[in-house]
Amino acid sequence: MQLGLSVSDSDVSSFTPLVVLELADDTKAEAITWLLNRIRGKQQNGGAELLVDQLLFPAQDGQKSNQNVFVVGSTLQRLLKGAEDVGLFKEFQDGTMRGFTYANRESFKDFYGDGEGFLSDAECQYIIKHELDTLRAKNEEHVPGYPKVKLYPGKSVVRRLQSKGVLVQYFPLHNKEDLKRLSFSWYKKIKLSFQPLDDIRHYFGEGLALYFGFLEYFTFALVPMAFIGIPYYLFDWEDYDKYVLFAVFNLVWSTVFLEVWKRCSATLAYGWGTLSHKKAFEEPRAGFHGALGFNPITGREEPVYPSSKYHLRIYLVSVPFVLLCLYLSFYVMMVYFDMENWAISIYNENPNLATGILLFVPSIIYAVVIEIMNLLYRYAAEFLTNWENHRLESSFQNHLVLKVLVFNFVNCFASLFYIAFVMQDMVLLRQSLATLLITSQILNQVMEAFLPYWLQRRRNKKVHKRMRRMMGDKELPLLEQVQLETEMNTYLGTFDDYLEQFLLFGYVSLFSCVYPLAAVLVVLNNITEVYSDAFKMCHVFKRPFSEPAANIGVWQLAFETMSIISVVTNCALIGLSSQVKAYFPESETQMILIVVAIEHVLLAFKFILAFVIPDVPKHIQVKLAKLEFDSLEALKKRVSTNFYVWNKILIYCLLRTAFYFIYFFK
């Protein structure tokens, strides 16, 4: 049974393919027919009113390929109306950012003619994703052809098909011409300049553009630390008393860095129309399960899971598991110290070049083990968080971030805290910090850049060879592109990218005063990170759907928490310096009290500084206030107009009633 058309370049001239839907190879024919009818159906009948067509791939190496691959597009009018449904903000004629409305479309800047080019590809794909996600079951009790895949009114069809494995994946297609231009301006030219954040946002969306904006900002913010750290490393290396001033500068830098970033992100988000974007009502996650009940807010039927079971899973299983992992991390740390003592003893017995190199081996092994443990724990944390059965995606992400951050913080920094404050060995602290930082950066570059590039290159060659063998000289760019992109890895979001920057920020803010080159190494790492991440996004991963974002979310809180911990750490390091101890030769208690008092003063100064520096620049506050005022005035005018109209209708009805009463009863 052929459910669609074999699509070639000439076949898709009627619409531009924007999104690919891949169903399981053994999907029932009636389920496919039902889904396509819902996608194509009119909105008033519960459909998405989108355009969809089937791609028919030839057999591969004598084996039948998956024929259940579809491309989805839309008419321009449908996309413009969808832009209003998702609450897209665009620039108005007066320069302010306002929620787009189809009725007032011509009042928006850059809207010409029928609106061709007004919406970016990323925005069009985001709209299509929203329309697909909000396809809801009506009166169906189950998916046609799958009696066990139950449905109920209001259930998201796409999420249900995803959770049951019927829908394998759906993703946005790359635009070859736009991608080529972006690649050239972004990473193909090695130059000292800012990233094309507006172009990144235009192609990948605000969430990813904000990550690259933060990466760029963090790198530039580290430059003063790097410049100050170089002379400290060259001239005052063995004189640890000198790191007091560096530690104080570190404290001020970490606070100002984060507060100024808030202003930068607010400026970017306002220009992109996401600062005032209201978050849509969250639907249950695709993997959420429970007994059928009613949502008290929407009144729709949906799974309900008892909160008592949810909390029991967290406190009786997840928390003990995390504590067990932390215990294993501490155990591995103690094994590392045993190895360190063994290497030092061998060097002391026979100091030479070989035993000198041996001194660094335990730290290198420990750094590799840390990365492996972080990776394994990440998979375990994802499985555990999914098993907890969170109803909302935001709740799932928050619990996952908390689990991963706690373990990574302890796993990466526990040994440094132990060396600094228990052993009080600044030479070993410097060596361990340098080894951990350098080794982790090398491993990250290999795992995140070189390995994915090599694997994707091999995969691309295989697909090109297979397609040429099957099709001969006939060119089918769309088929080939879809075949390539369906086999690409799925980009799982900015979680790992922010986590890496969080750990690097920790290395710099916590202990860089004893290893001033930390900032230099992080700057070099981030410069290569920009290019490797840019290449990954353009050529290694599937194109991700655009997601509106006003800031970096929970990661802002994570970085601020790290900066507070850095205040305590740096004050303690200052207290351990011989320069400070020399002022209190007889009373160590007095010294501790003074250091604690200074720490509290610095924390107070930090919070005052955070309060004094506004999160949103003044000119943007004025624009937001003006927009709110205009909205209120428009609402008042509408209410006043409606009141006037209803008064006229009421008077008219009364007069008509009086006329009929007089006419019939005169």
Image (cartoon, rainbow, N blue to C red):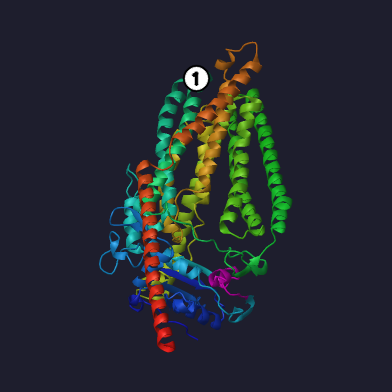
Mark 1 residue type: Lys
Determine if the magenta segment contains residue 162.
yes
Determine if the magenta segment contains residue 202.
no
Q: Nearer the viewer, residue 142 or 90?
A: 90
Horizontal arrangement in the rendering, residue 286 relative to residue 484 (left or right): right
Question: How far across and down, in percent of the image, does residue 189 sit?
Answer: 32, 48
Q: Nearer the viewer, residue 35 or 499?
A: 35
Label 1 sits on residue = 242
Name the quadrant containing residue 143: bottom right
Magenta residues span 150-167
Q: Is residue 574 above or below residue 653?
A: above
Name the quadrant containing residue 663: bottom left
Question: How far across and down, in percent of the image, does residue 157 sit?
Answer: 55, 72
Q: Is residue 228 above or below residue 21?
A: above
Question: How far across and down, in percent of the image, does residue 195 sit?
Answer: 35, 47
Q: Is residue 321 visible?
A: yes
Residue at figure coordinates x 65%, y 23% from the top left: 349
Q: Is residue 468 above or below residue 174?
A: below
Horizontal arrangement in the rendering, residue 63 relative to residue 388 (left or right): left
